Image (cartoon, rainbow, N blue to C red):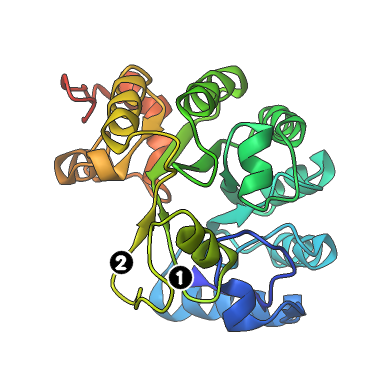
Amino acid sequence: MTLARKRGCPFTCVYCTYPLLDGSRIRCRPAEAVVDEMEEMTRTHGLDYFFFVDDIFNHPAKQAEDICRELIRRKLNVGWTCFATPKSMTIELLRLMKEAGCKGVEFGTDAASDLMLRNMGKSFTKADVRRVSALCKEAGLPAAHYIILGGPGETEETVKEAFEFMDEVDPRAVIAMIGVRVYPKTPLEQTSIDDGIIKAGQSILDSTFYISPLIDRERLLSIVETGASERRNWVVPALDIRNSEEAMAALRRFGHRGPLWDMLGERRRTGIKEGANGTA
């Protein structure tokens, strides 16, 4: 079950609609009310796994800590996962999250080079990503990094840097998107106009994706397909790499609860095999 614990986002990612829809001021639900909802769903519907859909669980940190402590106090036997930012995550919070039932953390990393992180409007650097990846391993929590390839300024060199850096930090999963969805009134909309991706005044209610004019689209797809297929922890939905319906069904047959990306490290143990195209 998905669960929301706050509204508002003060960050400035160039593509994101959260600040437009919810505002930039954060409004948090009381920790007790959040855990009340989890407890009610567990008691009345037998649910035992939750996903916090807020954009960033670990900001503000105080409320995240309060929710964890309330879960621990009530001894609510549930598992859960969340989105988080590499910036300001601490080993103390990660350990508290694990004690409270957290089974994994999904980071909205978006890029894996300092240039692309700046271009995507992120508030952290590769050093922050490297640090938080090590902290997750220290805390014993598997991590997934979501990255978006093809953003403003993306080149063949920055794509290759993304593969090299993800190899270095070695998370349980890398979930890669190709192209950046363009939404009205975001900074990316103006960049898309400047780069000739769309025209001023053009309706973009239908899906419109930005891909950097500094890299050929087919070349980008080729690099990602080759690199992701060679790495067991990469998932690329657009290319159906470790994301096919057959793969998902195979993983669920083993009774796994929670995010399917967490099973990437378990395939050898369970006997799930990969085909030539990287799918299970």
User: How far across and how far down the image is residue 194, in percent?
Assistant: 51, 59
Residue 28 image position (x, y, % from top left): 74, 79
Query: Mark 2 near mark 1, Cβ–Cβ under 8 Å?
Result: no
Q: Which residue is mark 1?
A: 183
For the residues marked 2 and 1, what is the alpha-carbon distance in whole angstroms? 9 Å
User: Is residue 271 in view from this perspective?
Assistant: yes
Q: Horizontal and vertical percent for residue 273?
A: 21, 22
Task: Name above or below for residue 114 compared with residue 72.
Answer: above
The relative height of residue 160 versus residue 212 in the rendered view (above or below) is above
Q: Nearer the viewer, residue 118 or 67?
A: 118
Left or right of residue 52, residue 126 in this image: right
Quadrant housing residue 69 = bottom right
Residue at left 53%, top 72%? 3
In the image shown, does 278 or 154 lie closer to the viewer? 154
Q: Is residue 16 above or below residue 117?
A: below
Q: Position of residue 173 (x, y in %)?
A: 46, 34
Q: Quadrant of residue 137?
A: top right
Left or right of 150 on screen, residue 275: left
Q: Nearer the viewer, residue 211 or 81?
A: 211
Q: Disc 1 residue type?
A: Tyr
Q: Amino acid at mark 2?
A: Ser
Q: Upstream in the sequence, badge 2 or badge 1?
A: 1
Instruction: Identify which residue is drawn at 71% across, 44% down.
Output: 86
User: Circle 2 is placed at which residue position?
Assistant: 207
* Vertical comparison of 84 with 20: above or below: above
